Amino acid sequence: MTKIRGIFAATMSVLNSDLSLNIEKTIKHAEKLIDQGCHGTAIFGSTGQAQLISISEKIRLLNNLSESKYRDKHIIGTGLNSILETINFMNVAMSLNFTKFLIMPPAYYKYRDLEVIEFYSKIVEAVPNCKIILYNFEKLCGYKFSLECVETLVKRFPNQIVGIKDSSYNLFEKLKIDNFSIFPGSELKLLKGLKLGCSGIITATCNVTAELSRKVYDDFFSGDKQSHNQKLCDVREAFDKYNLISSLHTFYSKNNDVYKNILPPLRLLNLNEEIDLLNNLKGLNFKLNSEMAA
């Protein structure tokens, strides 16, 4: 099994004015991020507003994404609380030859490691040929993976549980599992993670930092001087002041109005927040690549 490595953007979803998913523009957005330097994208992660988008729209996008020139470079997020809907959605994706999935435990309910192991076990038993990247983000789902839980899942399902996106940051410095991909969820952790043996990153702000992140990644493996990491971290910190979905859509909307469309209860930044973000980025001499603004 080839270990998953690299810079992955938790790619944005592009919406029409009626808040329906614009499938063509969402796919083009993801493809441009790969052109900018990402090794791939995570479609329908939390940044893609996955929990707010209908299953029917997700399936229609998968059908179109299966014809993408980068079809093999996409990880599919499920973004569903229902285990049966998750399994059904994965089966549709598998029928289109998508095998890599980013799956977070369900939100709202309280549970512990034992229940999480049972949740993923049921998924693997139903979709045995899948490759799952666990999604560790206590802020969104209310549960934080333990080392023991991850180790148990990998031991039980070594061919299916192949990695983790660590956005709670309690694991990436401690997990040591052979042939297992570990992705911190922030550019702030990229260089440190690589030094610890992590596989790269999966992050929201790679929607704007794809080129910078790739340079840091490539310079690490080539042994070149790290001349871009500080700017990369500064840009991430500028966006971190606000909800990342709100700040990314606001930033993109300065060049393309379609990014003003965002699903409630999410919103764009207010005027003061927008001015602060743009001034901070201007001070860093950072702007959106012209190709991404189109």
Image (cartoon, rainbow, N blue to C red):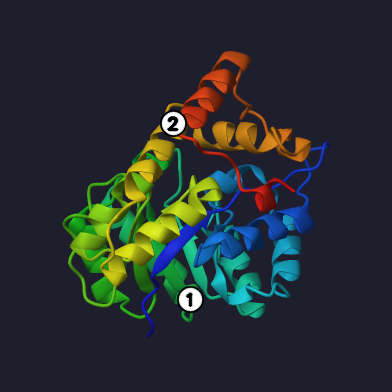
Quadrant showing the N terminus: bottom left
Q: Earlier in the sequence, mark 2 or mark 1?
A: 1
- Determine which residue is flagged by label 2: 238
Q: Nearer the viewer, residue 30 or 223?
A: 223
Left or right of residue 53, residue 21 in this image: right
Q: Residues within 10 Å of mark 2 (few under 14, many from 20)?
A: some
At label 1, which amino acid type do we have? Cys
Judge whether 228 appears above or below 276 on screen.
below
Q: Residue furthest bottom?
A: 1
Between the residue at mark 2 and the residue at mark 1, the CA separation in whole angstroms equals 36 Å
Element marked by disc 2 = helix
Evaluate whether residue 290 shows in this view.
Answer: yes
Q: Quadrant of residue 28?
A: bottom right
State the image coordinates of residue 29 (x, y, percent, origin top left).
67, 55
Q: Amino acid at mark 2?
A: Ala
Q: Looking at this view, is 209 or 250 the one in front?
A: 209
Q: Residue at image x 30%, y 70%?
A: 221
Give the quadrant of residue 267.
top right
Please, is residue 91 above or below residue 144 in the view?
Answer: below
* Residue 60 drawn at (x, y percent): 76, 62
* Residue identifier under label 1: 130
Residue closest to the eye, 277 or 141: 277
Please state the horizontal and vertical placement of residue 233, each as a whole percent of the image.
36, 42
Judging depth in this view, the residue of 212 and 175 nearest the camera is: 212
Residue 94, compared with residue 19, is above or below; it is below
* Residue plotted at (82% across, 36% down): 17
Choose mark 2 or mark 1, whichever is in front.
2
